[in-house]
Amino acid sequence: MLNLLRKDVIAIKSSFWIIFVYLAVFSFAFIPNNEMSIYFVSIYTAFGIIILATTVDIKNNNHRFLVTLPINRKQIVLGKYITSILLAVFGILASYGVHEIAKLAAPELVKPYDPILSIVIPVGIVLVLTSIYMPLFYALSKKGAGVINVVFMIVLIVFAQPVGYLIHAFNNQQSISKLVLFLIPAAIVIFVVASYYLTIYLFKKKDL
């Protein structure tokens, strides 16, 4: 499993500069104009990194090579999920760092935010997005990856306002019961696990 994670890191190493382009573009787009920029920059950057990782896999035909190795497809999928989560957390922490720097340099640009929720909420949203994205990616792979990526970016843009409303509700915790605050993370975990097993099923059915 460790070697699969190393493979993903090595695969995107040459494209690592793109991550900082994502971070810079989304920061310039959201920080001066959106009071919840820390959430949007985190989510867009993190999901952009996940798309980058899967795109590199397709470009290099990694799946076709991996299935020839003495590892099963379940391990390949698990490795991709772990890598995606780690890369997403990196993107979210990078966004948090940029906002901390911006808050010191130009405090008028950055609205106050909860240091814990500003990490936890994007992680939850990115996990949900990843859980939807991965089964589609492994089912369609090279033939439909470009379409999937475009569709997801459109969805992120279209649903930015509803997501902003949900984030605002979370920030205003007085309006949310403790039961709901417990159920939402539990539901996200169940959703991720279900997505993982669905992805394994779809990947095993695929002829490479």
Image (cartoon, grey):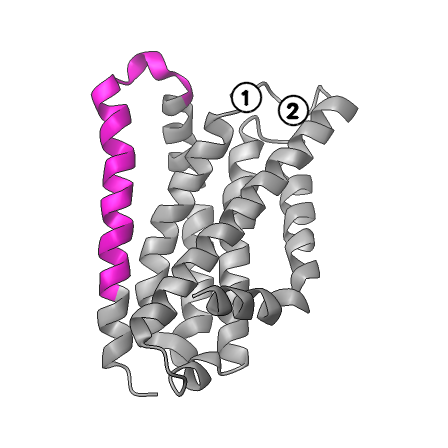
Question: Where's residue 139, x and y in %?
Answer: 30, 73
Q: Which residue is mark 1?
A: 113
Q: Mark 2: which secondary structure?
A: loop
The one of 3 and 111 positioned closer to us in this rendering:
3
Which portion, as a residue range, is magenta?
A: 171-198
Question: Where's residue 191, x and y in %?
Answer: 25, 48
Question: Where's residue 45, x and y in %?
Answer: 56, 48
* On screen, residue 49 above or below 60: above
89 vs 129, left or right, is right
Residue 172 lies in the magenta stretch: yes
Can residue 106 be seen here? The reply is: no
Q: Mark 1: which secondary structure?
A: loop
> Is disc 1 surrounded by few (<14), some (14 to 19) or many (20+) residues within 10 Å?
some
Quadrant in which residue 194 is drawn: bottom left
Tell me if label 2 and label 1 are in contact, CB under 8 Å. yes
Q: Image quadrant for the N terminus?
A: bottom left
Q: Which residue is mark 2?
A: 110
Write the residue at 58% across / 64% down. Answer: 9
Can residue 48 be seen here? The reply is: yes
Which three-letter amino acid code belongs to the residue tagged 2? Val
* On screen, residue 88 above or below 102: below
